[in-house]
Image (cartoon, coloured by chain):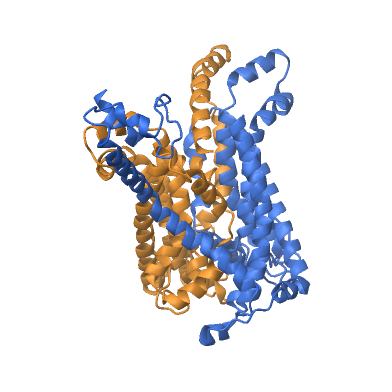
Amino acid sequence: MSLTTDLPQSTPPNGKPGPGKAGAKPGPGRAGSGDGAGDAVPSPRRRSRQRRERLFQWLFLVPAVVYMALFFGYPVVKNVVMSFQDYTTATFFTGEAPWVGLANYVTVLSSSLFSTSLLNTALFTVGSILGQFVIGLALAIFFQRKFPLNGILRSLLLLPWLLPLIVSSAVWRWILDKDSGALNRFLGDFGIVDTGVPWLTSTSLALIAVVGVNIWIGIPFNLTILYGGLQEIPDELYEAGSLDGATGWKAFRHITWPMLRPVVSVVLVLGVVYTLKVLDIILGLTNGGPANSTQTIATQSYALSFQEFKFGEGAALGNILVIISLVFAVLYLRASRRAVDE
Amino acid sequence: MTTTITSRRGPARGSGNGTGRGSGRGTGPAPDRKNWGSTALAILFLAIMLFPVYWMVNASLQPNGTTLETSWLPLKPDFTGYATAISEQGGNLGTSLVISLGSVALSLAIAAPAAYALAYFKVRGASIVLFAILISQMIPGIVVANALYTAYNDLGLLNSIPGLILADSAHGIPFAILIIRAFMNGMPASVIEAARVDGAGHIRAFWSIVLPLSRNSLITAGLFTFLFAWSDFLFALTLTTTEAVRPVTLGIFQYIGAYVNDWSSVMATAVLASIPAIILLVAAQKYIAAGTTGGAVK
């Protein structure tokens, strides 16, 4: 029982019942249990020790909380404020940013570019996610087979995901080059096309090319997470299924897919949230062009703030992107809660 | 999230290795015959997926200035691309290295104590902190950059290495907290309690018991934090306005922003900028595996 002096330190300071401490009630009753030297003396000493303890515990968390507040909390709030102001280069000299109400939102939403960016964002996101997921799942299923070098080959597939995005953009710029790019030369050698295809310089092809590159980048992530999900499905289910005649497609339809559902929803929603934010790849490959054919909400927000120096309008567009992301964030939290439940 | 993934993995793995695979092998036609056909198919997939990486290396070894025909194989490797890359981008590579190392130090210094507090103390508001970390992943970088630019402008942090270290850590800190916390959750509480009974204070218990035991998760978090900061492009692009501080990602962007007539040095820079990722993949396999599983939570 001499340990009781240490126990309060390991129990929650806020009175929540900790494991194994269900009997001990917080408050004055506890003081008498341990050292019976004197009932009046230990009580304030313990309380101050408890307070010091709580302070110590918070000290571990404080730097992270401060950082998150400064680098995520502050920007979000600041961005909302800026979106209601006429915040331009002049603001940096005069320090004045006149309040303009919803004018920035009106300008941004009524611009003809908004509908283009919104459509491009939707096409870019849906196309990328669909491609990454389908190919990633196919590869994940393939790698369930047991064959030599399986592990090494699977981990080497991660490389596209680990490379800096701007490096990937530079490499693909060169591969997709109209005149001497590897893809056109390859297609030319096999007689599939006669003249160079303007992958990145044609308004009708650029978005497709950008989506293709983004699929290439996203396959490893989808493969890895889905592979992990598949590994967790117990073999017994397939054995039991095969007794009932569920093999091949039937086994996939009735065993694999239902069991994989929670992982699938997490992968898809995370994919959407990340794809909405993508900026590096598009700026590196096309810079939003040609003729805005690859402009998305994220790149458009960048252009407004950092190329036209209309920070207020850029902030307004950024906030619209946040709202779209939040809708998917809610979906994500619901999906992950389902994953926890199962 | 993290805990469920790891805890679900445990039993499923066990049963798979034990009964499932065992009986499968027993009934299978030839247990020892290697499935080399599938290996060949997998190598083909890998070749297609890694072709761009090969092409990057191949193009970097071509003689300077040839935009017309890059040969399919670097039969006569020419290193002038690398010479140009190092003379023009060497300083930027150094800048990137300093920023990335700084970001690793800052991220671990902030994330490790926080992960400990979240895993061990039932601090009031712990769930709010975790929720905030998850939500922070939904915030587009451009929104953060937009607001940071104005704040940095007032604080004089534009075009500075400390400014970029602070901003780049936004990629790594939430991820590091989640990864390290997931690991610490699996550490027996009795170890720390024993240390505390022995009279070790919080800081000593954390420093000499918890941190050494969490070594692997710290390495994983550190490696990924390095890679995130090294790959950062958005903050480099928005929070610098002069040539004074220029990470290599921005150097590459400037290369390809104009008309390119010397692809070999662009590709040589790209190869040099890929080295951290390649080292990570080859030398730190098991840490990568740990990080990608955690990536599901990120």
- Chain letter of the orange region: B
Q: In the rendered picture, chain A carries what hue?
A: blue
Report the front residue among A73 and A301: A73
Task: Tell me what residue is drawn at x 28 percent, y 32 percent.
Answer: A6
Report the front residue among A58 and B46: A58
Q: Quadrant of the C terminus of chain A?
A: top right
Residue B125 point in image, percent of width and height: 48, 46
Up-down: is A41 above or below A33?
below
Residue B280 point in image, percent of width and height: 40, 49
Please identify the quarter of the rendering in which residue A245 is found. top right
Q: Is residue A180 visible?
A: no
Please identify the quarter of the rendering in which residue A207 is found. bottom right
Q: Is residue A154 visible?
A: yes
Instruction: Count every numbered label the image shows and give the total.
Output: 0
Residue A61 point in image, percent of width and height: 40, 50
Residue A76 point in image, percent of width and height: 57, 63
Report the front residue among A169 and B267: A169
Up-down: is A154 above or below A30?
below
Task: Tell me what residue is drawn at x 45 percent, y 80 percent.
Answer: B242
Task: Tell me what residue is drawn at x 52 percent, y 47 percent.
Answer: B128
Q: Is residue A35 found left or right of B49 in the rendered image? A: left
Furthest residue in direction front, as rendered: A40
Q: Quadrant of the N terminus of chain A?
A: top left
